[in-house]
Image: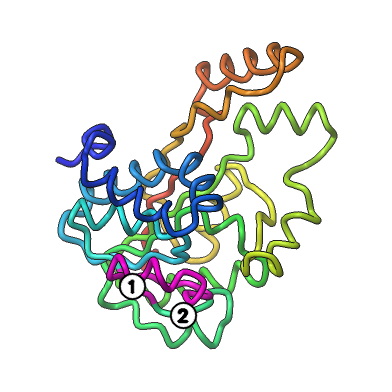
Amino acid sequence: MITAAALDRDAGVARAIARVEGFNPASNGAYIRYHRQRCIDDVAQLASAFPGARILNVGGRPYLFEAIAQVAGLTVDTLDIAPDRDAATIADLGLSVRCVDIEHAAQRQVLDLSPYDVVCMAEIFEHLRIDLVGTFRDLAGAMRPDAVLYLTTPNFYYAPNFLKMLATGRSGPHLVSEWNKLAGVGHMGHVREYAAGELAEFFRFTGFAVDRLIRRTTNPQALLGGGIKQVPGRLLARGMTGLSDRFAQELVFILRPAR
């Protein structure tokens, strides 16, 4: 069984991550620092739970997941709204990437999902802004009955963020900066983040059965940082995160079409 700990120590994984970072050290480096362990854990979970599966990953940039998945021997095709942004990375890694915007009905309705055992949507749900219900009903209808949707998204109740919201009076990320990413980087920032219960309701409404929910914290370093004035808040956040998985960093759903 492939484990996250084993992948984390794997020299091939380290080289693959370095290759991804090398194409855009500033942007990709920042992404890797925050998402490295999360992507490693995603690959380990998929490799262990669905050995030999053919995977469709929705939203590739900067292709960190794909680079790690290659080392683990996973078969991954990818959809991205603008793969030309990372043409050099895609070519260097030899990735299979199609230009598809999953939020556009005409594009997703012609997708053939029948070859795929797993559709992966890691840290994508919170970016969707057009038609959540239509998007997920189309996915549920197009997936094979025995296929799974592996979906991860930030937890609204992640302790550091939740405490920050209470302290600042904000309900989430800065609206201007998140929407400006459409022009700056070519995709939407976070529309909003969600709690586990409301996501489960949504998935059931749109045609999915919830097989499993995992709450995890893959980047505990996010609990650190800040000056001396932030020490009480950091200590409280660490305590809350350790006390209950309700305050974990991310939500991972394993979903199946309910038919």
Is 45 situated left or right of 185 in this image? left
Residue 257 position in % (x across, y down): 38, 65
Q: Is residue 189 above or below residue 110?
A: above
Residue with the mark numbered 2: 99
- Image point (52%, 21%), residue name: 244
Residue with the mark numbered 1: 91
Does label 1 or label 2 sit earlier along the sequence? 1
Is 24 situated left or right of 1 in this image? right
Instruction: Look at the numbered disc 2 and give the secondary structure of its residue.
Output: strand
Residue 169 position in % (x across, y down): 85, 34
Q: Is residue 199 above or below residue 55?
A: above
Which of the 4 image quarters holds residue 94?
Answer: bottom left
Residue 93 position in % (x across, y down): 30, 65
Residue 200's tag is none
The amino acid pointed to by label 1 is Ala
Q: Residues within 10 Å of mark 2 (few under 14, many from 20)?
A: some
The amino acid pointed to by label 2 is Cys
Give me the C-alpha separation between circle 1 and circle 2.
14 Å
- Image point (55%, 50%), residue name: 26
Is 54 situated left or right of 66 in this image? left
Depth check: 35 or 2 in front? 35
**Which portion, as a residue range, is magenta?**
77-97
Q: Residues within 10 Å of mark 1 (few under 14, many from 20)?
A: few
Residue farthest toward the right in the current orientation of the protein: 169
- Image point (52%, 31%), residue name: 248
**Callout 1 touching callout 2 (CB < 8 Å):** no
